[in-house]
Amino acid sequence: MVLVGSSFWYGHRPFSKKFKELLEIGFDYFEISLDYPVPDDCAELEKAIKDFGIRLAFHAPLDILLASPRDEVFRASMKVLEKCLSFAAKFETQYFNFHALHFTPTFLFPEIRKKALRNFENACKFAVNFGKDSGFEVCLENDRFFTEEFVRGDIKLTLDLGHFVVGEKWWGRDYRESLTRFVEKFGDRILVTHAHDVSFSPIQDHLPLGSGDLNLDFIGWLLKEKIKPEYVLLEIFWKRKRDRVFADSKDLESSFEVLKSLLV
């Protein structure tokens, strides 16, 4: 059975109220983003988690650069990663999701790329081993910095459909062909799929399902016939394209219904 989840973050305060709203929609679990000030300031979040007894996953903060070739930045990022993994280990965590970020313009040079890949491989080994010892899977999520060279060792994958589609549209490629090839190559590693709609003009992702330009028939086929993930997470941030109004529970509910129809 596929578990359908919702992303959850600092902006959803008060946490107890939002958990109640989303559980009433029917979500099976929540992927909680550990962006600052979480997990340092987390008393309210921990209380809400315990009060509701919910099924959990976690998303590492986006300000850690685990693929940085600069050792000072990498070491600082590893400290934050360890703190976040330790926080996840306090709960019955399903999986822990993170990115291979670097923001390094010189990454395109082979000698710099080699150093960055070595640092990231060390981060993967640490995170995967920590997860094994703590009872949860660790997943690498694709984004604009993602390269298949980052898929190392025993790391699982989170396939973010919107991120993938935006990248392919940017380069003028047919995202359906590219996605199918990627899934056929890495399908045995894909534990989680992130779902959200995408606008092609302007380019924008994390929209409610059914509000953008994704071919939902194709997405449904891909999920059911090719990926067959254990977890599908709705990662809906924006109410509509062309603005920055946060999505609300109604937008999540409508996306939830669309997703469930795709999974039938």
Image: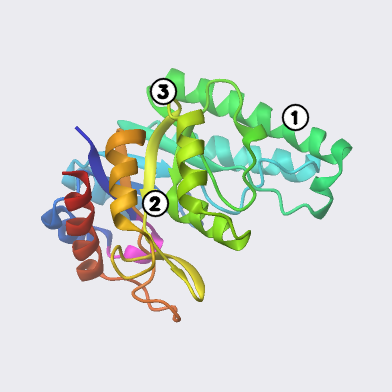
Q: How far apart are marks 3 and 2 (CA)?
A: 20 Å
Q: As displayed, is residue 200 above or below residue 149?
A: below
Using the image as rendered, state which of residue 202 and residue 157 is in the foreground: 202
Image: magenta residue range: 8-14
Q: Is mark 1 on a helix, strand or loop?
A: helix
Q: Earlier in the sequence, mark 1 or mark 2?
A: 2
Q: Earlier in the sequence, mark 1 or mark 3?
A: 1
At label 1, counting other C-alpha atoms closer than 10 Å, the crowd grade (few under 14, some 14-19, many 20 or more) is some
Q: Mark 2 = which residue? A: 42
Which quadrant: the C terminus? Answer: top left
The residue sitting at 77% across, 52% down in the picture is 104
Question: Percent from the top left, x then y, of residue 70?
Answer: 81, 43
Check disc 3 and give the amino acid type: Ser
Check disc 2 and give the amino acid type: Cys
Q: Is mark 3 on a helix, strand or loop?
A: helix
Q: Distance between the residues labelled 1 and 2?
A: 33 Å
Q: Mark 1 = which residue? A: 118
Question: Percent from the top left, x then y, of residue 190?
Answer: 42, 32
Which numbered dot is residue 134?
3
